[in-house]
Image: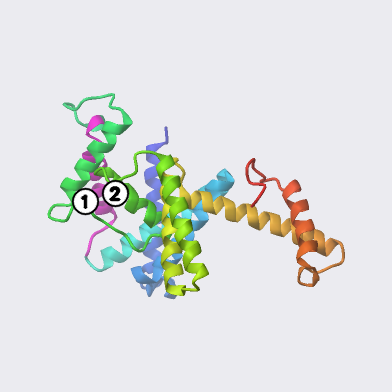
Amino acid sequence: MADLDALSQAIRTLYEIVERLRGPNGCPWDRRQEMSDLLSYTKEEVAELSEAVETGKPEAIRDELADLLFHCLFYAKIAESKGYFDLTDVANHAVEKLRRRHPHVFSFDCERGLDDETLNRQWQAIKRKEMGGASPWIRWQPQLSALWGAWKLQQMAASWGFDWPEASLVFDKLHEEIGELKETIADNDKPATLHELGDVLFSVVNLARHLDVDPERALALANRRFFERVRTMCERIVADGKTPDKLSVEELDVYWEMAKRSSASHMPGSENQ
C-alpha cells in the first residue's frame, strides 16, 4: 500500500508548483492558458499514455501518468481562479461518485458477491438515476473517436435489449453491408459509397463488441504492426542502396514479405495484412 503521508506531500508539492506557474511571477505561457487551450495537449497526453501502456514499459507509463496528473491539477487551478471549484471539490466529487456507484463495496446493507451481469445492471441503473431528467436511454459523445463512439452507441442500445443475440448474426449483417457497398461502387455513386462504407465500419465495430474486443485497441495494434513492418521494409531497401519510391510494386512486395517474417510484432492470423 502507498505511503499516504508521502502521497499527500507529493500531491501538495505538485499543486504548489502549479500555483507558482500560474502566479504573478510565474510562467507567462502557463498564466495565459485557459481550459480550452489545454484540451489538445491533454488529448495528446492521453494518446501517449495509451502508447506507453501498449508497449508495457513501466517508466513510460509513469511518465505519462505524471503528465496527466499535472493536467488534472492545472485544470483545477484554472477553475479555482475563476471561482468554479477547486481541487478539493474535484477529489470529494470523485469520492462521492465512486461510493455511490459501488454500493456493493461501500454500503453495509448491499448484497455482496454479485456477478458481472448484475453489477452492470446496477451500474446502469445508478447512472440513469444520476442523469435526472435527461433521457436514460440515448446518449452520444461526438467528441469520441468514431470507432469508440460507435462502440459506445451500440453498447448503449444493447443495455436495453436492442442488439444482435449472437456474433454470427453480426457476421451476416457485415456481409450484407459489404454487398451494398460493392453495388454503390459499381454505380460510381460517391455519396452512397460514403454511406455504405460507414455502415460497413459500424458493423465491424459491432462485431468487435460481440467478440469482446476493443476496436480502438485492435486498430491501434494493427497500425503499430504496419508501421513497424514498413520501417523494417524501408531500412532494408536503403541498406540495399535503393529508395522505396524507385521500386516497382512487385519489388516492394518482396521487401514487405521479408519485413513480415522478421517483425517482432508478428501475430498468428495476420499474414494477409
Task: Kindly identify the residue that appears in the image at 56 percent across and 43 percent down.
Answer: 58
Relative placement, left or right, of 273 versus 210 is: right
Name the foreground residue: 19 vs 259: 259
Instruction: Tell me if mark 1 has few (under 14), some (14-19) or many (20+) residues whose alpha carbon lies within 10 angstroms of its own.
Output: few
Name the foreground residue: 23 vs 217: 217
**Which mark, residue 137?**
1
**SS for callout 1:** loop
In the image, residue 2 sits, relative to residue 41, either above or below, namely above
- Where residue 14 sits: x, y (%)? 41, 55
Residue 164 visible in the shown view: yes
Q: Which residues are magenta?
A: 84-104
- Where residue 4 sits: x, y (%)? 37, 38
Evaluate if marks 2 and 1 touch, with contact meaning CB atoms under 8 Å apart: yes
- Where residue 232 sits: x, y (%)? 74, 56
Residue 63 visible in the shown view: no
Name the foreground residue: 48 vs 119: 119
> Overall secondary structure of the magenta stretch?
helix
- The residue that mark 2 highlights is 156
Task: Kindly identify the residue that appears in the image at 27 percent across and 41 percent down.
Answer: 98
**SS for callout 2:** helix
